[in-house]
Image (spheres, rainbow, N blue to C red):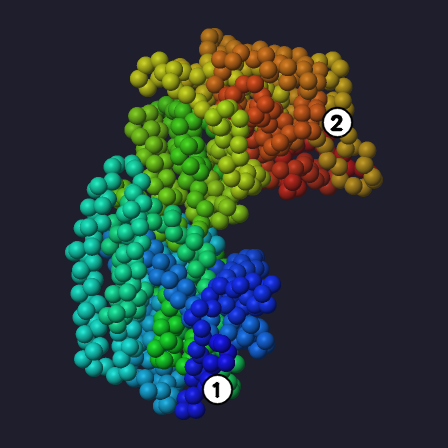
Amino acid sequence: MADEAATTANSTDETIVCYAPTMITTNGIWQGDNPLDYSLPLFILQLTLVVVVTRILVYILKPLRQPRVISEILGGIILGPSVLGQSTKFANAVFPLRSVMVLETMANIGLLYFLFLVGVEMDLAVIRRTGKKAFAIAVAGMIIPFLIGTSFSLMLHQKSQYMKQGTFILFLGVALSVTAFPVLARVLAELKLLNTEIGRIAMSSALVNDMCAWILLAFAIALAENASVSLASVWVILSSSAFVLFCIFAVRPLISWMIRRTPEGETISDFYICLILTGVMICGFITDALGTHSVFGAFVFGLIIPNGPIGLTLIERLEDFVSGLLLPLFFAISGLKTEISTIKGVGTWSILFLVIVLSCAGKIAGTLLVALYYKMPFYEGLTLGFLMNTKGLVEIIILNVGKDQKVLDDQSFAIMVIISVVKTSIIIPIVTLIYKPARKFAPYKKRTVQRSKPDSEFRVLVCVHTPRNVPTIINLLEASHPTKKSPICIYVLHLVELSGRASAMLIVHNSRKSGRPALNRAQAQSDHIINAFENFEQHAGCVSVQPLTAISPYSTMHEDICNLAEDKRAAFIIIPFHKQQTVDGGMESTNPAFRTINQNVLVNAPCSVGILVDRGLSSSTRLAAGQVSHHVAILFFGGPDDREALAYAWRMSEHPGINLTVMRFIPGEAAAEPSSSSGRRAEASAPGILTVVTDDDREKQLDEDYINQFRSRTMHDDSIVYTERVVRNGEETVAAIRSIDSIHDLFIVGRGQGTVSPLTAGLTDWSECPELGAIGDLLASSDFATTVSVLVVQQYVGMGVHGDMLGVQDSPNEQPEHFIYNHTSRRPPLPRGPELFHSQP
C-alpha cells in the first residue's frame, strides 16, 4: 500500500510518495482498518486539530491583545516539525507525507475564496480618495524596507541556489515591506485608535500598501516560475494583464447585468451566486495556467464585483466558513513548513535579529519622515511607523509561494515566518507605551439633565445597535422639546462589533461620500440609521445630528461610549435595553453582550444615563404636521435618579403635545419607621474610624424642594397632572402602578440605586435585570400587563463611579475644603459643615 511504495531516490534528497487513490474512506475499525490510513478521516482529524489548537491559542493570547493571525501561525508551528512534529510517531500518524497534498489543496481553496472576499470588500474608489498624506506614507513605508530586504537577501542568498538573485531580492523585499490591512484594523480597534486621525491615516495607507503588494506579488510569481528571466516571463506578465482587462471589460458588465435583473430590495438569486462562486474557481484556474498564482485570479475577480447588495450577500454566505475554517488551514500549513531547527549558528540568529530591527526601523524611518514633512507631531509619526509594521496574510502567501517555487529554502522561510510573527506581536505593547493622546477636554459641569440650563444647548449621546432601535429613540428625542432657546444636539453612535475584514473596510468607508452603495451588512445598517436621523434633523428644526460609528469588541465598547460622551460634553446618554419586544408582546434577549455594555456604561458614564426599553413610542397620534402627542407618566419615589427622571420629564412637558402625569409615592405610617433609622446607622462604629453618613433626611429635603419647585412652576399647566399615592410596602406599590391608566405610551422612572426605600422592598428579590432598578425591572418584565416603553434614568453624581462618599475632616472646627470619593460611590456631595461628619474620639 501507500507506505510500501514510498521510495527514496538516490540522486536527490526528495522523497517520492505513491499512494493508493482508492483509499479515501475507511471500512470501519471493526474491519480492522486504521482510520488514519485513509485520506478523508485523516483530513478531518487534521482540520479539527488545527481549528482547536488555533482557538485555544486565541483564548490564551487574548489578555495580551494579540491579533488572531499570530495564534494561527503559532498553531501551525506547534503542530509542525518545530514542536510536536519532533516526535516522529506524531508526525507520521497525524501529518504523514501522503496527506500533504489533500491538506495543501484544501488550504489553497480556502485561500482562493478568502482573497476573492478581500477583493469584493476592497473599494478602489477609497484608494483613489486616500489623499496625498496617506499615499506618501504608504510609499515611503514600502521603499526603505524593500531596500533593506535587498541588502539582506545578498547575505542569505547562497551560491548553491539556482534561483536568480533578482527574484530572491523581489520576494524578500515584498515580504518585508507589506502591511497587513485586516490585522491592522484589529490592532487599531484594540488600541482604541480607530476614530482618531492617526487611525484613519494608518488604515488608508495600509490599503494602498496592500494594493501595491498584490501587484508586486503577481510580478514576483511571474518571475519565480521561470528559473531565468526569459521571454516566458514577459509572456506571463502580458497574458496576466490581458486577463485583468478581460475581467474589467467583459466580466464586470456581465455581473452588472445580473444585478440589474434582480428587482430592487430582493436578494440576488441562488443561480447567480452559484455562477459567481464557480467564476472564482475558473479565474483561479486561468491565472494558474497563465503562470501566476491561482490566488491572483480570484482576487481580481473579487475586485471587479460592483459594491452593493451582491457583495453583501457573498460576504455573508462565505465569510464565516472561509475565514473560520479553511483559512486557519493555510496558516497552519505555513507553520508546518516552518522548521525552526534549520536556523543554525549564532551568525544566522544574529542576522535574523538584525533584519527584524532594520526592517522595523526602515518602515518607521520612512513613515516618520513623511509624517514630519506633513507637520505631524513626532510621537504620532513614530506610532504610525510601528503600526505600519503589522504583518499578516499577504506576507505569508508571498513566503509560501516562494518556498513552493524553491526561491526560499527552509532556513530563509523559517527566518521570514519568525520575523513576521515577532513584528506583529510587539506592535500593541509598543504603541501602548509610546502613544498616549492628551485628553484635550476640560471638566464640564452640565453632566445631568437637572443641571442643564433651560436656555442652553442640550447634548444627548444616542447609542444604536440596529435600525430597529431608531424609530422609538427619534420619537423620544422629538418629544424632548427642542427649541430655539434650548436646541438639542444629538450624537448618534452606531455600535458595531469588530469582526474580521468587513469591519476593517467599514472604518475606511466611514469617511466616504454618502450615496455610494453599502459594502457589507454593518455598513448598510449604518446608512439606514444615519439616513433616519438626518431625515429627522431636516424635519424637526432646532435639532443638530452628528452620526458616528464605534467599531470595537463588545467587551470594550463602553469605553468608546463613555470617552465620546466626555469628549462631546453630553448631559445624557440613551442606550437601548438588551431585550426587544416579540410579536406576542413578550420580551426576548437580542444579544447578551448588549447587556454587559449597558452595565459597564452605567458604572463608567461621565454623565446621566437612560436605558430605553423599546416597546414602540408611536407618533401615529399626530395632531398636525410636526406635532406629536404622547401621554407620559413618571413614577417618583425619591432620590437623585428620580429627580433626574423628573427633570427629563419636565423638559418633555414643555412640549405642547405632551401630557405628563407625575405620580409620587409617599410611605405610609407603617413603612416610614425603618427608613428613617437607616440615616444614622453608620454612627456607632469603632473608635477612631472615619464614618460614613447616608443622610436620608437630606435626600428627602432635596426631593421636597425639587417637587415644590416643579409644582409651583407648573401649577397652571393643564397638560400636567400631579398625584400622590400613600403606600406601605412593595405589594401596594405594584398594585398602584398596575392601576395607572392604559393611555400612557411612556413611563419614566429613576433607577433608584443607592436609595433603600421600604416602598420597593421585596421587589428586588426576583428582579431579572437589576441594572434597571426595582421599578424599571418591574415595568420591563414580560409578565407586566402594560406594554409601554420605559425610560430608566440614572443621575450622574460624583466622580463617575458609584458607592458611598467619605468626608474627611482634621479637626471639628475646620471646614473641609474637598471631598474624597470612595470609588464605589453613588451619593451626591454632602453639605459642608461639622455636623455631618462623625469622627469618633
User: Is residue 405 visible in the rendered structure shown here?
Assistant: yes
Image location (x, y in percent) of residue 680: 76, 28
Q: Determine whether 809 is above or below 621 in the image.
A: below
Is residue 280 toward the left or the right of residue 351 in the image?
left
Q: Residues within 10 Å of mark 2 (few under 14, many from 20)?
A: some
Which residue appears at 44% of the width and 42% of the height? 495
| Amino acid at circle 2 | Ser
Q: Quadrant location of the C terminus?
A: top right
Pick the residue in front: 198 or 285. 285
Is residue 191 toward the left or the right of residue 283 in the image?
right
Which residue appears at 43% of the width and 47% of the height? 551
| Amino acid at circle 1 | Gly
Q: Mark 1, mark 2: which one is toward the viewer?
A: 1
On the image, numbered disc 1 is attached to which residue?
347
Label 1 sits on a secondary structure element that is: helix
Pick the residue in front: 797 or 257. 257
On the image, numbered disc 2 is attached to which residue?
678
